[in-house]
Image (cartoon, rainbow, N blue to C red):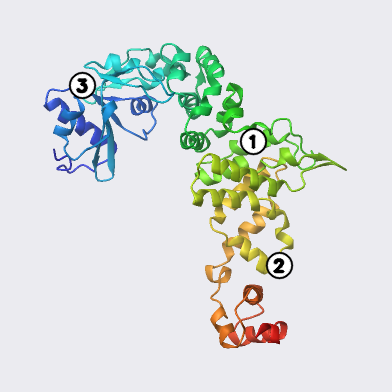
């Protein structure tokens, strides 16, 4: 079936409606379902579009032979057209859940009513006729949507014991939508919270990342804490509660309060910035000491180590982990910016993803004493420096040193760094000047030859 033979720009929404039209032309039911219906009713732009049908997987593939069967056991097929993709699933009811993740078996159904009953929350079990816009609501989802409530379908505890990831999803939806979790559902989360430890690390990471980046990170972490989930998935963050800070620098309160205030100010952050914001002070609980005042000596180094364990535990990519750890490692350096040598400041600014370092520092200031002098200074300097000024073409290379009779070794990096330092400081402008510095500081004694 060629879905692109139309002039309309193909998007997931357009594709979903065309898929539904194909099903109907062949005598099948086809309804929009789940998050896209919920978001449309809330006047939000859906992120994903899903279609539910009474067609079996084999019938779906017959109509869409280029589609991919991504969940054969569960009747899920992925239909693509260009960049647009839509998940199409056969109406089904689920058998027993044996592993806290997925049912041991499913039964394909002919009615959306049975399909609604097996879903997680009432607001995610709404169906919409893509032609008429009629809403099909079998479990009170429309009322809960209007009342801004997250409610598990049926027996809440049973729903969470079926799929333990639903524990985190309940918090994410409540935070993202600004809804409250219905009391029986919330109490069920508290009773079952320990089961979140069985969820695959990657799935935990992804749900936490969504909580951090979807616009209500602070409230999300308050709910994680109140539900008992936080101490199970991120005990290092739970440990921040009650860890006091010196009031002259942190009048806002303890490390937990400071972190929540910082998260509250995140505005469409990248995942790495969001995690850097969450973890920037993760080393404070273990380094707290009361001397002449409250101190956290070595908290940056401790934070990098602790965060590294978290990155490994939640299986972050190497690229993301490196950036998050760099954010933690450098977040206290801004206070020294005014006293930095020009070469040091330029090296600081030319770090990969420095805009995230700047933003984390800005948020850190606003969530504490409100002083942004260092941020404004570094931000202005960064804006005024070209790429060439930050990373000029080298005046000398290792090959140049070898050609002059220097023997390769650890001293090479020291020599080249000294040359680049002077170049960044603006005191060297040519290879001839660079050789003058090298021969003055590093004469070719027998040990260097």
**In the displayed structure, does residue 115 sit left or right of residue 305?**
left
Asked whether disc 3 touches disc 2, contact meaning CB atoms under 8 Å apart, the reply is: no
Q: Residue 49, position in %: x, y?
A: 31, 32
Q: Crowding near pointer 3: few (<14 within 10 Å), some, many (20+)?
A: many
Q: For the point 16% across and 42% down, which residue is it?
A: 6
**Mark 3 — residue?**
54
Secondary element under disc 1, as helix, strand or loop, is: helix
Q: CA distance from mark 1 to mark 2?
A: 36 Å
Q: Residue 223, position in %: x, y?
A: 57, 25
Q: For the point 41% across and 11% down, which residue is it?
A: 154
Q: For the point 49% across and 36% down, which residue is it?
A: 201
- Res 408 quadrant in image: bottom right
Residue placed most toward the observer, 298 or 272: 298
Residue placed most toward the observer, 408 or 356: 408
- Res 226 quadrant in image: top right
Q: Comparing marks 1 and 2, which lies closer to the viewer?
A: 1
**Mark 1 — residue?**
236
Asked whether disc 1 touches disc 3, contact meaning CB atoms under 8 Å apart, the reply is: no
Q: Please, which residue is most extreme toward the right here?
A: 292
Q: Residue 404, position in %: x, y?
A: 59, 88
Q: CA distance from mark 3 to mark 2?
A: 69 Å
Secondary element under disc 2, as helix, strand or loop, is: loop
Query: First in sequence: mark 1 or mark 2?
Result: 1
Q: Please, which residue is most extreme toward the left here?
A: 26
Q: Crowding near pointer 1: few (<14 within 10 Å), some, many (20+)?
A: many
Q: Crowding near pointer 2: few (<14 within 10 Å), some, many (20+)?
A: few
């Amino acid at each position: 079936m060629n879905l692109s033979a139309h002039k309309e720009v193909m998007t997931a929404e357009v594709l979903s409606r065309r898929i539904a039209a194909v099903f109907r032309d062949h005598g099948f039911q086809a309804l929009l379902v789940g998050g896209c219906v919920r978001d449309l009713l809330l006047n939000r732009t859906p992120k994903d579009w899903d279609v539910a049908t009474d067609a079996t997987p084999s019938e779906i593939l017959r109509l869409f032979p280029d589609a991919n069967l991504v969940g054969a056991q569960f009747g899920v097929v992925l239909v693509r057209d260009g960049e647009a993709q839509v998940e199409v699933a056969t109406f089904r009811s689920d058998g027993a859940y044996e592993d806290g993740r997925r049912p041991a078996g499913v039964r394909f159904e002919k009615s959306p009513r049975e399909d609604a009953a097996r879903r997680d929350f009432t607001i995610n079990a709404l169906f919409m006729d893509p032609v008429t816009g009629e809403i099909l609501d079998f479990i009170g989802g429309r009322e809960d949507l209007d009342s801004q409530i997250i409610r598990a379908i049926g027996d809440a505890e049973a729903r969470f014991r079926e799929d333990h990831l639903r524990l985190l999803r309940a918090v994410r939806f409540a935070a993202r939508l600004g809804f409250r979790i219905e009391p029986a559902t919330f109490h069920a989360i508290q009773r079952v919270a320990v089961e979140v430890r069985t969820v695959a690390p990657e799935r935990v990471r992804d749900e936490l990342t969504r909580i951090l980046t979807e616009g209500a990170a602070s409230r999300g972490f308050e709910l994680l804490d109140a539900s008992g989930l936080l101490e199970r998935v991120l005990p290092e963050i739970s440990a921040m509660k009650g860890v006091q800070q010196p009031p002259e620098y942190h009048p806002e309160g303890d490390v937990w309060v400071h972190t929540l205030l910082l998260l509250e100010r995140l505005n469409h952050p990248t995942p790495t910035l969001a995690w850097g914001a969450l973890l920037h002070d993760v080393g404070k609980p273990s380094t707290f000491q009361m001397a002449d005042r409250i101190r956290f000596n070595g908290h940056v180094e401790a934070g990098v180590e602790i965060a590294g364990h978290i990155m490994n535990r939640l299986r972050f990519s190497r690229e993301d982990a490196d950036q998050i750890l760099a954010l933690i490692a450098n977040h206290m350096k801004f206070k020294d910016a005014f006293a930095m040598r020009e070469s040091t400041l330029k090296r600081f600014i030319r770090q990969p993803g420095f805009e995230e370092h700047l933003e984390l520092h800005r948020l850190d200031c606003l969530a504490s004493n409100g002083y942004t002098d260092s941020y404004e200074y570094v931000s202005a300097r960064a804006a005024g420096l070209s790429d060439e000024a930050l990373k000029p073409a080298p005046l000398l290379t290792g090959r140049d040193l070898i050609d002059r009779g220097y023997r390769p070794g650890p001293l090479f990096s020291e020599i080249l760094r000294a040359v680049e330092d002077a170049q960044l400081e603006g005191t060297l402008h040519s290879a001839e000047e660079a050789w003058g510095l090298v021969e003055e500081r590093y004469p070719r004694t027998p040990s260097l030859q």
